[in-house]
Amino acid sequence: MIKSVKPIFVVLVFSSLISFSFIEKKDPTEKLVPGDKTPIPVLEFDKQTLDLRADDGKYTLLSFWAGYDALSRMKNAELSHALQNSDRIKMISVSLDRYESVFHAAVEQDQLDSADCFIETEGRTSEIFKKFHLRDGFANYLIDSNGLIVAKNVSADELNSYIN
């Protein structure tokens, strides 16, 4: 009986090893996480490098959104309005709309500070989209004065803890 179990055991182990080699390895879902150094964002639209530097003890909130993505647009507007009176967090808002007219209309309708809003008309094919590993729903990054990501996808309510 033991002699017949051994070959079966060997076959099972061998087949298990072979099956594991065919399992597709997936990339981690999160590419940029808190503690990582922030990539330098360059807008292809006007060949502009965004300055994410904040003074010591202060933060920069980099928010990505688009007029066609209602949820990202709503989150961006909430964050912008929550930070209107804050001197501890500077917000930079990047729209990934293809058309400037849509971008300008959204900035006006959402009552955003146009000085802190930028557009990347290359959208999903842009380098900034790839560098920040954006997906549907986009994202925001809270960055400290050293250029490190402190938090990702913060809500307007969560910003209160950073403001205070």
Image (cartoon, rainbow, N blue to C red):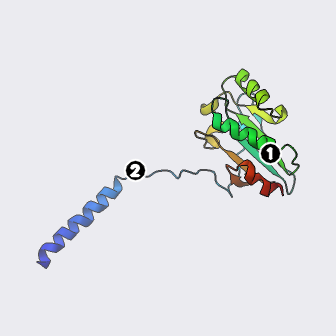
Q: Quadrant of residue 79?
A: top right
Residue that carries the numbered disc 1 in the rendered image:
82
Q: Are marks 1 and 2 in contact (CB under 8 Å)?
A: no
Residue 20, position as x, y percentages in the image: 34, 58
Q: Nearer the viewer, residue 116 or 22?
A: 116
Q: Identity of the amino acid at label 1? A: Ala
Going from N to C along the chain, the mark reached first, 1 or 2, is 2
What secondary structure is found at the residue carrying circle 1? helix
Outermost residue to the bottom: 2
In the picture, the quarter occupied by the C terminus is bottom right
Q: Nearer the viewer, residue 112 or 53?
A: 112
* Image point (21%, 65%), residue name: 11
**Mark 1 or 2: the one toward you:** 1
In this view of the protein, can residue 120 be seen by the observer? yes
The numbered disc on residue 24 is 2
* Image point (61%, 41%), residue name: 134
Residue 37, position as x, y percentages in the image: 70, 53
Q: Identity of the amino acid at label 2? A: Glu
What secondary structure is found at the residue carrying circle 2? loop
In this view of the protein, can residue 41 be seen by the observer? no
* Image point (80%, 45%), residue name: 82
Q: Estimate how packed mark 1 is, as few (under 14), some (14 to 19) or many (20 or more) residues with alpha carbons within 10 Å.
A: some
119 displayed left or right of 30: right
Task: Note whether 122 is above or below 77 in the view shown.
Answer: above
78 displayed left or right of 3: right
Q: Estimate how packed mark 2 is, as few (under 14), some (14 to 19) or many (20 or more) residues with alpha carbons within 10 Å.
A: few
Task: Note whether 50 is above or below 16 in the view shown.
Answer: above
